[in-house]
Image (spheres, rainbow, N blue to C red):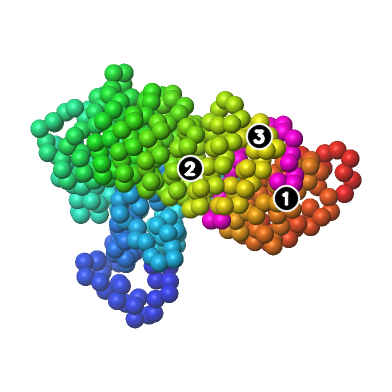
Amino acid sequence: MASLLLGKSREEWIKVCSSPGFCQDMDDSHMENTMHILSLSYYDLPCHLKTCLLHLCIFPDDSLIDKDYLIWKWIAKGFVEEKPGRGLFEAGEEYFHNLINKSLIQGVDSEVYGIMDCCCIHDMVLDLIVSKSREANFVSDGTLSQSHTRRLAHKSTELDLTRDTHVNLPQVRSFIVWRCDIVKWALDPRFKLIRVLALERCTIREGCHSLEHIGNLLHLRYLGIRCYSWVDELPEGLGALKFLQTLNLEDTGTFDEMPCTIGKLTQLVCLRAPQISASVGVIGKLTSLEELQIAGPGGSDEPRRQFVKELGNLCELKVLKSDTTLKNINETMQTDLMQSLGNLQKMEHLTLGDSIRSTVNMKAWDAAVPSRDLRCLFLQIISFPKLPSWIKSAHLPSLSHLEIHVHDLDKQGLVALGGLSELCYLRPKNIFNGNNNN
């Protein structure tokens, strides 16, 4: 209730509580009073936040919902409005925090880093939005034959997509399957206008069809396949999805390389494929990317060096996470890496993992000019003899999370770390080893 009335005048308080359609009898039970207050909060929301909140009814009870994953779905469904000087993801992030401030969702910090990267929904709030969703026919969780809505969601059920083939489904724009037992699966041609397709944590029966006809879903904005060991390969037809904005392939399949046609997805802004690599020349074409999680190419140094150079083309990139991209990185490749990172002046989160032993090209690292917007920096790929010269407040005024391998830390390095006024998480591995007595 405090969140609802915050910032409103006394006259507005009275207006909100006198709004038509609300029960005025406050002698009801405690549960009814609580639901009354929640309803007040819901109806007081602007339209765009109501829509984003109703979308949360697709998640099962007690779900821990990834913030970024949620925002990309909002964007794909057209719930987020872009404003001058602010990208779609930033606008969606503002929506997310507004719902937290209204106490309608609960932010959850990661246990290790203390970053708010998830949210959950109280049972009573979930009951409310499920009820409002049914009233507005916002999302259907029934069978295909019973559905007349634009959004379908199946949760914890047995699913056979080959049933009810006579039912026409031209109105469906979103189909989300969560923790279902998929008995039979086929990319239904009746979903020809679908914008969001997501299979989350499902079990797949033997003999189910693959993604062979995925290229027919030309209006897809979001494709999420997170069902381990289901897809053996991604079809070449994926490149036909010209409007695709988000491709989420976490925990998916047994394949280790994406088709070259991925390079045709020029509107892709988020690619999450942390266990999958891309051929040389593919990633550099995706110049709209804002988030990239990927495994680098294996084999000889040359493909990996070309991949590192390609990263420099992604000038819109804000999040880069890769645990295997730079394994056994040599001195030349370190120079290429720092030149590429110097081009990424919108970078906010950089994770380079898979710690290895390499000769450090300290000249290349010290010459770097990283993004001033960098907030999270996790460098596990190499052990530095000293702290790189640009890790200081003058170059990284917004740095809040830092993980780095350093052999020795002298007084100058300690002063540099102490000057990072926004720093709230520091994990300096290997510091004070050797003969350093500072």
Residue topped by disc 2: 284
Magenta run includes residue 358: yes
Asked if 38 appears above or below 292 in the picture, the reply is below
Residue 358 appearing in the image: yes
Q: Residue furthest top?
A: 206
**Between discs 1 and 2, the one toward the N terminus:** 2
3 or 1: tag closer to the N-terminus: 3
* Mark 1 vs mark 2: in front: 2
From the top left corner, tell me how far across and down residue 365 is, in percent.
Answer: 70, 47
CA separation, marks 1 and 2?
25 Å
The disc label shown at residue 344, or none: none
Q: Which residues are magenta?
A: 345-364
Q: Is residue 399 magenta?
A: no
Can you identify the residue that label 3 sits on? 329
Q: Which residue lies under the disc numbered 1?
A: 366
* Three-letter residue code for mark 1: Asp
Look at the numbered disc 2 and give the secondary structure of its residue: helix
Q: Quadrant of the N terminus?
A: bottom left
Which residue: 43% across, 50% down? 288
> Where does the image place residue 429, in percent across and percent down from the top left?
73, 41
Direction from residue 55 to residue 415 in the image, left or right? right
